[in-house]
Image (spheres, rainbow, N blue to C red):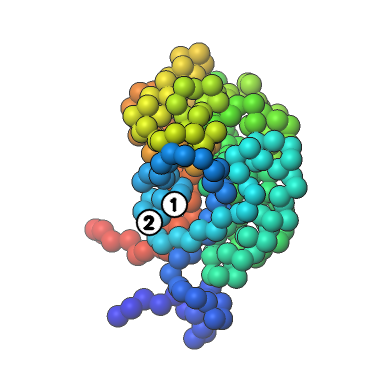
Amino acid sequence: MIDIPFVAGERQFAWVKPRMAFHGAPVGFLMLDRMPGAGIRPYLPGDTGNASTWSVPVRYKTVPGMNVTRIFGPEGEALTSTVVQAATELVREGAQLITCGCGYSIRYQEAVRDAVDVPVFLSSLLLAPFLERMLPRNKALGIIAASKAALTKPYILEAAGLQANIGRRVVVAGLEDTPVFAPTWNEGKGDLDVSAVEKDVVDTAVALVNDRPDIGMLLLECGDLPPYASSVQKATGIPVFDYTSMIEFFIRGLIRKPFTGLI
């Protein structure tokens, strides 16, 4: 028998909106408008932009004009209404969660949350205060970001709830000066060299942990970094969290399965 998620006590389908084009894809992703230029840069399994990353089907919507250059800088604020419109469309299409493929979209978190009636997790940075509170008082949280300069701007730190702890309990390392990751993802140049990008990410994480031996956990900010999380953990020996940690947490709450075992 098919297990249909009816509204409690009623013969109504939970979460289903009238005249939806398709069903069964509960997670809605706002995606960056990819920068023009030559090169093949696919979203790998594990990347937020690869649909096979997720344990349920997802739906994607590109936000016009929301590219790396604009989201890193103060001019990104002008995109707020466009981001809200795209999020609203995803909810209208049936999304039960709104998220995004870029951690710096944290700047739109409150505006989108005020505009839709479903949970909103736009950035993996929303995990940072939670992870920091989990750690012993003598430990710090390390964040690997696409750009440290962009992440440590006051409006990003405030939106992520990190301003009070930055530098002490929360330490950031950026990838903006790396030889391969930066031109590939921050500037949109050339083909994706998976091994070289992986080396950049792992080297950055190891250097951060060596510089701050008190780091007890790592958080990967960028949606392009989860494919390298396993390698980072192997190299550092500490827990590593990212976008997949956050989104799959929601999915497991959305689709609860009965426990089986021995009594």
Secondary structure at numbered mark 2: loop
Mark 1 touches mark 2? (CB < 8 Å): yes
For the C terminus, the image quarter is bottom left
Q: Amino acid at mark 2?
A: Ser
- List x then y, in percent, for residue 113: 67, 56
The image quarter in which residue 171 lies: top right
Percent from the top left, x then y, of residue 206? 43, 19
Give, as a three-letter code, the residue at label 1.
Answer: Glu
Of callouts 1 and 2, which one flags the residue occurring earlier in the amino acid sequence? 2
Residue located farthest toward the bottom when viewing the structure as drawn: 11
Residue, disc 1: 248
Quadrant location of the N terminus? bottom left
> Is residue 155 shown left or right of residue 179?
right
Front residue of 159/86: it is: 86
Residue that mark 2 sits on: 55
Structural crowding at the residue carrying mark 2, measured as other residues with C-alpha within 10 Å and reported as few (<14), some (14–19) or many (≥20): few
Residue 87 in the image: above or below residue 13: above
- 93 or 250: nearer the eye? 93
User: Above or below — where is 97 with respect to 1?
Assistant: above
Q: Disc 1 versus disc 2: distance between alpha carbons?
A: 7 Å
